[in-house]
């Protein structure tokens, strides 16, 4: 029987990987429905009903459809609150203060970390894969922006085990796809591994079974 939850998009997409990691942390069974972006399937009328902007991922369960990876992750944490990792959005006893501690770093990731890290990952990892030339000017401009963000992260993680305190949370999870791309798929791993506290953080979060499974799913050959 098919899983009641479907994630639409290629696992190689960091946004799709973000949602998959959340579902795995929550022990929610799901299936991945491939979307061949090279053939324009993300712009097809059927897909646009799920994601009106024609981007991946899209998410569907028995109750609703959701798009935007961070919104999907929040929905998963709330809708499946009693499954798997129950503290991804904080402990109940910590209330709105605990949730705010997580939310602010999710916002920091989306606003400050994601734009330069994704731009670098596209130029250094995806462009060559797609047969395009790497624009080193774009890489250099975004690396300068990313370094400033990582300097803040390095100081913060020197005082905190994880972004939101002493426990792994969605604040950490949302950072993982782009970090993984830059560490494993480009020559910019040193941005993380040569910063003591970031390196410690990455060693810990990337060793989680959920993320190891994401990497495993990414390495499954795509149907020809």
Image (cartoon, helix red, strand yellow):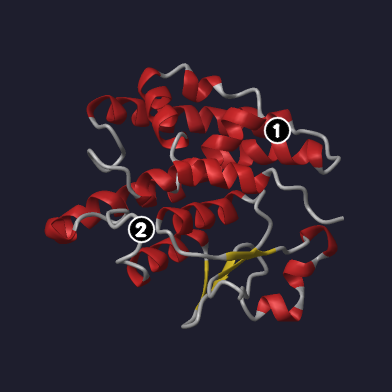
Percent coordinates x, y for residue 51 in the rendering: 61, 73
- Name the residue furthest front: 1
Picture disc at residue 84: 2
Instruction: Identify the residue at image location x=31%, y=54%.
Output: 103
From the viewer's perspective, is 91 left or right of 45? left
Residue 78 sits above or below residue 199 on the image:
below
Percent coordinates x, y for residue 218 in the rendering: 66, 46
Instruction: Identify the residue at image location x=23%, y=27%.
Output: 159
Of the 4 image quadrants, the one containing the N terminus is: bottom right
Percent coordinates x, y for residue 42 in the rendering: 73, 68
Q: How crowded is mark 1: few (under 14 residues within 10 Å), some or many (20 or more)?
A: many
Percent coordinates x, y for residue 7 in the rendering: 59, 66
Secondary structure, mark 1, is helix
Instruction: Identify the residue at image location x=56%, y=71%.
Output: 3
Q: How crowded is mark 2: few (under 14 residues within 10 Å), some or many (20 or more)?
A: some
Instruction: Identify the residue at image location x=66%, y=28%.
Output: 186
Residue 186 sits above or below residue 194 on the image:
below
The residue to which callout 1 is attached is 124
Q: Quadrant of residue 53?
A: bottom right
Label 2 vs 1, first from the N-terminus: 2
Of the 4 image quadrants, the one containing the C terminus is: bottom right
Q: Which of marks 2 and 1 is in front?
A: 2
């Amino acid at each position: 029987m098919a899983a009641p939850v479907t994630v639409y998009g290629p696992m190689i997409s960091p946004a799709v990987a973000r949602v998959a990691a959340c579902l795995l942390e929550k022990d929610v069974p799901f299936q991945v429905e491939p979307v061949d972006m090279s053939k324009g399937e993300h712009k097809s009328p059927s897909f646009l009903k799920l994601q009106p902007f024609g981007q991946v991922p899209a998410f569907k369960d028995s109750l609703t459809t959701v798009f935007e990876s961070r919104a999907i992750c929040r929905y998963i944490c709330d809708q499946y609150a009693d499954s798997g990792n129950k503290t991804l959005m904080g402990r109940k006893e910590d209330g709105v203060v605990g949730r705010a501690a997580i939310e602010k770093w999710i916002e920091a990731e989306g606003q400050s970390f994601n734009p330069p890290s994704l731009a670098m990952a596209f130029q250094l990892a995806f462009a060559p894969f797609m047969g395009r030339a790497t624009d080193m000017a774009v890489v250099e401009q975004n690396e300068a922006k990313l370094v400033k963000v990582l300097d803040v992260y390095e100081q913060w993680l020197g005082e905190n085990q994880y972004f939101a305190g002493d426990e792994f949370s969605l604040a950490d999870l949302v950072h993982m796809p782009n970090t993984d791309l830059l560490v494993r798929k480009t020559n910019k791993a040193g941005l993380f591994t040569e910063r003591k506290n970031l390196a410690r953080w990455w060693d810990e979060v990337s060793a989680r079974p959920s993320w190891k499974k994401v990497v495993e799913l990414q390495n499954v050959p795509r149907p020809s």
